[in-house]
């Protein structure tokens, strides 16, 4: 007899059909799956006990069968500007972060996909210790539920811009996206979900082939391969053009938007000549550029944000060459939101530009 604990599946990772099969096995009528899925995803019930629509006996039976929580809230910090950061605990004791960014009428959730990150962008805290492991589909999907329970309604946008490289955990991310977008539960529109990647053109093509209908952001940060190798040393060499080609292909084949993210770092990638080369790389491609002034990080005190003038000049240099671009404001500084790696997606509203 094998000994050890049986691993219970987590509710946040179960597709509607899997949940329905499990309930049928327990001898439950067909409508139960919708009751559970609706309570959990649509109404945000945090536990089996809270699903009062279910008979008490069934709730007790389900506690033994399926974990209603894959993650626990260890801590929540609220910044003065309305940004909140959750520190979530996983079953193996690891920790991840989820961030809520309210902006006007919007509530954007920034979710993590891995513990740590293998990409090692020099300005990003997530990659400092490398990658520890992929998150499960439930651990990814449930992050949105913590925010949903806190604000008492469905958030308006999801950006996959937290810890980790989403395209290196694509299968679990795709499961989470299908759960978020299932109309029988949370009913999230895929157009309001943005997947951000610093990985490979092949990964972007795989995402396109899954046809999830989500928007794409590519973490470019460099106008050419030499600068990119310096700023994103963990990504395979020689790929600025490969990435912008893949992003343009994604937009063409899926009909969704593709954005390039570009963290501006004083002296490294913010000079007028960098803007000129970037504009050339993007020529003829419908890719919007999201400029993000560096949020200073403790492990690289030598890296600085550009002055406001330099950032605006970079923006103007792109726009004068016909590149669609915006310059982001920084948010959540006082709680170091997502270790200062918050990428504020296009829809959050620019401080300047179009
Ligand atoms: N690995 C994926 C998902 C992480 S999101 C990716 O790289 O796309 C990464 C984004 O976070 C970057 O594109 C950048 O926009 C933002 N970011 C990370 N560190 C930052 C910092 N120190 N300052 C400003 N933005 C940062």
Image: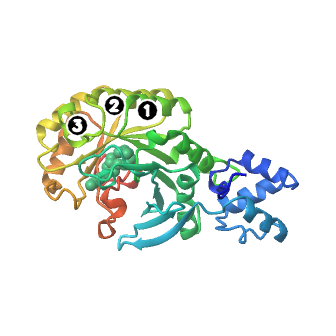
Q: What whole-number distance in Å separates the C-alpha atoms at marks 2 and 3?
A: 11 Å
Asked whether residue 148 appears in the rendered view, the answer is yes
Pick the residue in front: 144 or 215.
144
Q: Residue at x 14, y 50 (%)?
A: 266
Q: Dots 1 and 2: beta carbons under 8 Å?
A: yes
The residue at 59%/44% (across/down) is: 175
Q: Name the residue under label 1.
A: 204
Cα distance between the residues tagged 1 and 2: 8 Å
- Viewer can see residue 255: no
Counting residues from the start of the chain, the first of labels 3 and 1 encountered is 1
Quickly name the residue at label 3.
228
Q: Label 3 neighbourhood size at 10 Å, few (<14), some (14-19), many (20+)?
A: many
Query: In the visual, does 1 lie left or right of 337?
Result: right
In the image, taking residue 65 as reference, residue 330 lies left or right, namely left
Instruction: State whether residue 203 is above or below residue 79.
Output: above
Residue placed furthest toward the front: 1
- Check if mark 2's residue and mark 3's residue have beta carbons within 8 Å: no
Task: Please tell me whether residue 123 is drawn above or below residue 95 in the rendered image.
Answer: above
Mark 2 or 3: in front is 3
- Among numbered discs 1 and 2, the one appearing first in the sequence: 1
- Against 233, residue 154 (above or below) is below
Q: Mark 2 points at which residue?
A: 243
Find residue 204 and report its horizontal and vertical position in percent. 43, 32
Quick check: marks 3 and 1 in contact, CB under 8 Å?
no
| Quadrant of the image occupied by residue 239 | top left
Residue 153 in the image, given as x and y percentages of width and height: 59, 65
Residue at 12% in and 42% down = 271
Give the residue drawn at x 82%, y 71%: 56
The answer as to whether callout 3 falls within 8 Å of ligand 1 is no
């Amino acid at each position: 007899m094998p000994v050890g604990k049986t691993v219970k599946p987590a509710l946040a990772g179960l597709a509607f059909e899997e949940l329905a099969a499990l309930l049928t096995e327990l001898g439950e009528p067909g409508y139960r799956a919708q009751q559970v899925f609706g309570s959990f995803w649509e109404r945000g019930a945090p536990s089996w006990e809270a699903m009062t629509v279910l008979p008490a006996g069934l709730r007790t039976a389900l506690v033994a069968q399926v974990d209603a929580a894959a993650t626990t809230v260890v801590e929540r910090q609220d910044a003065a500007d309305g940004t909140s950061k959750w520190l979530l605990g996983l079953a193996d004791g690891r920790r991840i972060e989820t961030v809520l960014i309210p902006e006007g009428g919007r509530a954007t959730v920034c979710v993590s996909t891995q513990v740590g990150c293998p990409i090692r962008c020099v300005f990003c805290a997530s990659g400092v210790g490398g990658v520890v492991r992929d998150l499960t589909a439930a651990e990814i999907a449930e992050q949105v539920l913590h925010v949903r329970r806190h604000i008492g309604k469905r958030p308006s946008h999801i950006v996959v811009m937290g810890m980790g490289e989403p395209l290196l955990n694509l299968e679990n991310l795709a499961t989470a996206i299908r759960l978020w977008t299932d109309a029988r539960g949370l009913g999230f529109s895929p157009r309001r979900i943005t997947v951000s990647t610093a990985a490979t053109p092949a990964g972007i093509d795989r995402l396109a082939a899954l046809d999830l209908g989500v928007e794409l952001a590519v973490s470019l940060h460099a106008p050419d391969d030499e600068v990119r190798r310096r700023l994103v040393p963990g990504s395979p060499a020689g790929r600025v053009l490969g990435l912008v080609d893949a992003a343009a292909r994604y937009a063409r084949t899926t009909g969704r938007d593709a954005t390039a993210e570009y963290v501006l770092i004083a002296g490294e990638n913010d000079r007028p000549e960098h803007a000129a080369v970037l504009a050339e790389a993007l020529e003829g491609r419908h890719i919007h550029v999201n400029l993000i002034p560096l949020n200073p990080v403790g492990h690289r005190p030598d890296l600085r944000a550009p002055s406001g003038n330099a950032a605006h000049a970079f923006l103007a240099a792109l726009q004068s060459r016909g590149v669609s671009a915006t310059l982001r404001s920084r948010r959540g500084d006082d709680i170091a939101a997502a270790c200062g790696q918050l990428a504020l997606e296009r829809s959050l509203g620019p401080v300047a530009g179009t």
